[in-house]
Amino acid sequence: MTWLFEEFQLMCNEAIRIALAQSPKNRFQLTEFAYHRLKEHGLHSTHILAACEVAFAAYRNKARRSSPYVRHPFVKLASQAYQLNHLILRIPIKPREFVFLTLQGSEYHFALIDDPNLKKGEITITPAAVCLPLSKQIHSIEPSGLIGVDINERNITTSSTDGLTNSYDISRVPRIQETYRRIRSKIARLKGSDHRITSELLSKYGKRERARIGAVLHDVSKSIVEESTHKRMGLVLENLRGIRKNFARDRPVSTSLRGRMNAWPFYSFRRMVEYKAAWVGVPVLVVNPRGTSSNCPDCGSRVASLPKRQLYCGSCDKTWDRDVLASKNIMACAVPQALPPRRSDEKERGGDGSNPSSRWGEVESSRGKRWFNGTCNSGTGSRR
Ligand SMILES: [Zn+2]
């Protein structure tokens, strides 16, 4: 295998040199230019095609600053080039010469590999792992309702159009972050150790922190997507892009709050929800979070703040939990029917209304982009 990795790396770099010298228009032209040179390595022609693909992508990469070069050992194989039978992977080396690899993985991985409904894509093999992308045709759920998801520092609250609310405690996330912050500052204060050792330690603890936080967020996103699949409802999330600007250095917030908000992994949570939902055909809408915690979801009038994350609506004489109120408003952003009836003399909602008219435009425009059209991809990795 080591030999194959080395040869493939050589072939990629040779194809890159040919691309730089002859400026091909596409990877087929590069294959034409490079085929005979790469053939001399004696590998199966599938590796020549893959090396040209890798080389052309590196050559075309607009972001590159220096001459492209393949540094890490790996091999790519198109779906028709390899055979995968439960845990035996057969890959071609030379014409009529194969290598058999035994995959290691969990029951979960093998259930996916053995699923005849999943289409296997191009695999990437590195010395440490095999990465196998799987795809399937899915039929998107025609939602019978919506679930609004409000993301906070210590909890994630959902409200659905059937009137139920759920709260998931994620206070473990800031606690884990605090623990690792302390570990990192201890490493930084280590005396007499050189830069290489401290950076190795930092990377080790950074990986551990991400894994522990990831486990919490995977749990919550899984439950939320399961609820929406079970109820056949779409999901509504806040678009929290730009939240960090509110806590930038020129804003009057405390250093510790700024640090906590900047560390909150809201984007990775949203990505988890989005790909888990896509895999089962649940539509996800993204709405502007502006004003979602300042108006009553029942009547639309402004609410007053009470201690302990409570809010009070004077018109309804009702006390709301701040997170429940926000999740109901987020849900209402995407459901016109969930709004209180509009008076005929009222031209535009906004100001005292719960949903400024501008937000409707954003829901509409995000709907076109976010609605899934049938196919989606997901990846799974199996370690060798
Ligand atoms: Zn009210």
Image (cartoon, rainbow, N blue to C red):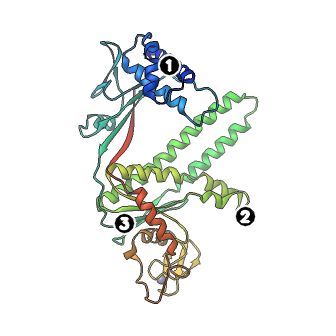
Q: Which of label 1 and label 2 is nearer to you?
A: 1
Which residue matches tag 1?
9
Quadrant that contains the N terminus: top left
Seen at 37% across and 76% down, the residue is 337
Q: If you read the primary sequence from the N terminus, does the residue marked by circle 3 or circle 1 appear first? A: 1
Give whichever of 180, 243 is nearer the camera.
243
Disc 3/disc 1 C-alpha distance (Å): 50 Å
Looking at the rendered structure, the kind of residue marked 2 is Pro
Q: If you read the primary sequence from the N terminus, does the residue marked by circle 3 or circle 2 appear first? A: 3
Q: Dot 2 lies on which element? A: loop
Q: If you read the primary sequence from the N terminus, does the residue marked by circle 1 or circle 2 appear first? A: 1
Q: Is residue 72 above or below residue 293?
A: above
Seen at 43% across and 88% down, the residue is 344
| Residues under numbered marks 3 and 1 in contact, where contact means CB atoms less than 8 Å apart | no
**Horizontal relation, residue 318 to residue 93: left or right:** right
Image coordinates for residue 38, horizontal then vertical, percent = 45, 14
Q: Dot 3 lies on which element? A: strand
Which residue matches tag 3?
146
Q: Is residue 116 above or below residue 293?
A: above
Disc 1/disc 2 C-alpha distance (Å): 52 Å
**Residue 220 showing in the rendered view:** yes
Image coordinates for residue 205, horizontal then vertical, percent = 59, 38
